Amino acid sequence: MRETGVRKNRIFIVLTGITAVLVLWNIRLFWIQAAAVHSFAGRGIDLTENSVIQRAEGIVLDSGRGDFLDRRLEPLTGRELQVLVLFPVNKQVLESGTEASRYEEAAGILGVPPAQWKSLILGLESPRLWQRAGRPAPLSPGEARRLEALGLPGVRVLPYKERYAEDQTAGQLIGFIGQNPERITKQFTDQFHKGELQLTSKIGNAGLEKTFEPWLQGLGPTSVSLFTDGTKRALPGLDARRIAPDNPNYPLQVVTTLDGRIQREIEAVMERLRIREGAVVVLDAERGDTVAAASRPAFHPGHVDLSGGGWSNRAVKAAAPGSVFKTVTAAAALETKAVRPGETFECTGELGRFGLSCWKEGGHGRLTLEEAYAQSCNVAFAKIAERLGGEKLELYARKLGLTGTVGWSGEVHGHPHLHQWDGEEGGLVYADPAAARDAGAVAQTSIGQRDVQLTPLAAANLVVTLLHGGEVRSPRLVESIRFRTGRPYEVFEPKMRTAAVPADEGIAPGTAKVLLKWMQGVVSRGTGRPLQQAVWPLAGKSGTAQITLKNGQPGENHWFVGYGPAAKPRYAAAVLVGQLPEGQKNTSLTLFREVMDVLAKQEAKPKMSPSPS
């Protein structure tokens, strides 16, 4: 009995001891969690803060936002690079002989002095991307293989998606993303309340980024974090972990109608010709789709300066068109039979009223309407406008799709009115309807002056309208939205601009055919003769508009619109070189010829099938 009592006492003492240890251990844990905001173990380490930092620190490799593709399914945004991600490491690692030599070898691969590389690694307090000139530095396949083979602690070669390339093309069309709390609360109210968007979220603020924002939002970013212990040593089994949304269908991809190769070459032409302000629009003659649309001043979506104005897409901004508008006057004269067949007009250089003169000093003499169109005679067209009246000019501008906007718009699931072209301005004939009854205003309007405004997009579409016998189309900029797997999510079919121009209210096919023939005459014997040096036979109409520059001085807009090849048209195009000092050499013809030569060169290349998505 006594031995039994002793045994029980010993068990009680042991259990009491264990209980005491557990209580002390729990007190210790509580103190660490609750009181470690001060200092732990005398090392000045805030464990609570650092535990949060450890979970949060990492590098976003892909924002999860949908990308834009061109018509060949080649990426316009979201180029994938192999990059170096650096994580903080235990400083003692660099002191060991083996590791130190491997880090030096990595410095040699990257082409940086070992001391500079060591200083960078030692100074890391948080993960970062290896950069050159302030941008993530892409690694060549050889560099990536050699660096991976070294297996350095805290150094990882990983895929990184770069939203905008350093030489980003179609900047104004793509637009840019940024914070916009007001739009988030007004246009994305549901997502804001659900917590899917915060006031600090970046959304599309211009261009396609803005127009297609609802479809571009992804399911979340792909990131990588390196899990370490308190001494910055990688934890076995965790190491670098990638965290990504698990859905093969997202993010969605927006497939544009653009040809990225043509777009880049046209931008290079504008740069070489030093076009400071202007635009080029190229449309596919068959479908009316946008093949390229370049704008100057240049703009990079990754470097947004709203005060500079470069972000504004000049392709959809209205400007005075000058003699390009004579196509409207000629169409009205042909359809209303305001001019008799073979009738001639006398041009002495001055009209004698309204203060209107011809560009050619001394005048053109006697010429027919066709010759007046080829020579761009102001006096002849002003006389014709007197017969037509101002209302006829506005009517035929509308018939040709030049009033209002022309870009593709329509209803899409959940979106009653989607307009693919962000910021497109409408065409204008009269700012004041009363001007249509003023003879002087009508004379100026007939030659594309006074209030007349036209966008390069609408001017190019005018040529497509003529090529389709007077049927006005709505140029697409986006062909479809696709799942990441390539399966269609939404397809935007080509469409007529029937809302503004019903099919039975356009010009007659015969009229369109005559105007196209006259455009060939502009190049063969008129103001477009320098275009005879082009690779293709071309046709079109020139225009020089008198304007007032931003500094208040007199200036000009130089235009050319047309098509090529003349015998079997493949493309319609409009070029505008704007805000030029008065009397400066016309560069629009040179620009148009070089644009068409780019297209001719592309057509001569062997055709390739679109790459798989």
Image (spheres, helix red, strand yellow):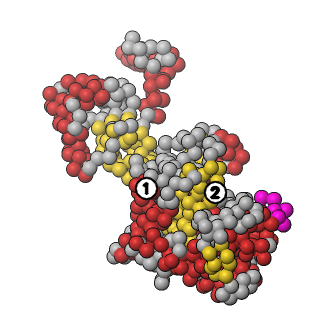
**Which is more toward the observer, 555 or 480?**
555
Q: Residue at x 30, y 44 (%)?
A: 157
Q: Position of residue 422 (x, y in %)?
A: 62, 56
Label pair 1/2, CB-CB below 8 angstroms: no
In the rendered image, is residue 62 in sight? yes
Q: Is residue 138 left or right of residue 599?
A: left
The quarter of the displayed image where residue 240 is located: top left
At numbered mark 2, what does the secondary structure look like: helix, strand or loop? Answer: strand
Q: Position of residue 471 (x, y in %)?
A: 65, 79
Q: Residue at x 77, y 58 (%)?
A: 431
Residue 481 in the magenta stretch? The answer is no
Give above or below for 609 relative to 453.
Answer: below
| Amino acid type, residue under disc 2 in the picture | Gln
Give above or below for 24 relative to 401.
Answer: above
Q: Is residue 69 left or right of residue 188?
A: left
Q: Position of residue 269 (x, y in %)?
A: 42, 59
Label 1 sits on residue: 273
Label 2 sits on residue: 546
Mark nearer the N terminus (1 vs 2)? 1
Determine the residue located farthest toward the top in the rendered image.
42
Q: Residue at x 44, y 14 (%)?
A: 39
Stretch in magenta: 428-438
Q: Residues within 10 Å of mark 2 (few under 14, many from 20)?
A: many
Q: Residue at x 21, y 31 (%)?
A: 113
Question: Disc 1 to disc 2, how far (Cα)?
Answer: 22 Å
Give above or below for 426 relative to 189.
Answer: below
**Which is more toward the observer, 489 or 497?**
497
Image quarter where the N terminus lies is top left
Q: Is residue 173 left or right of residue 443?
A: left
Q: Disc 1 or disc 2, which is closer to the eye?
A: 2
Q: Which mark is residue 485?
A: none
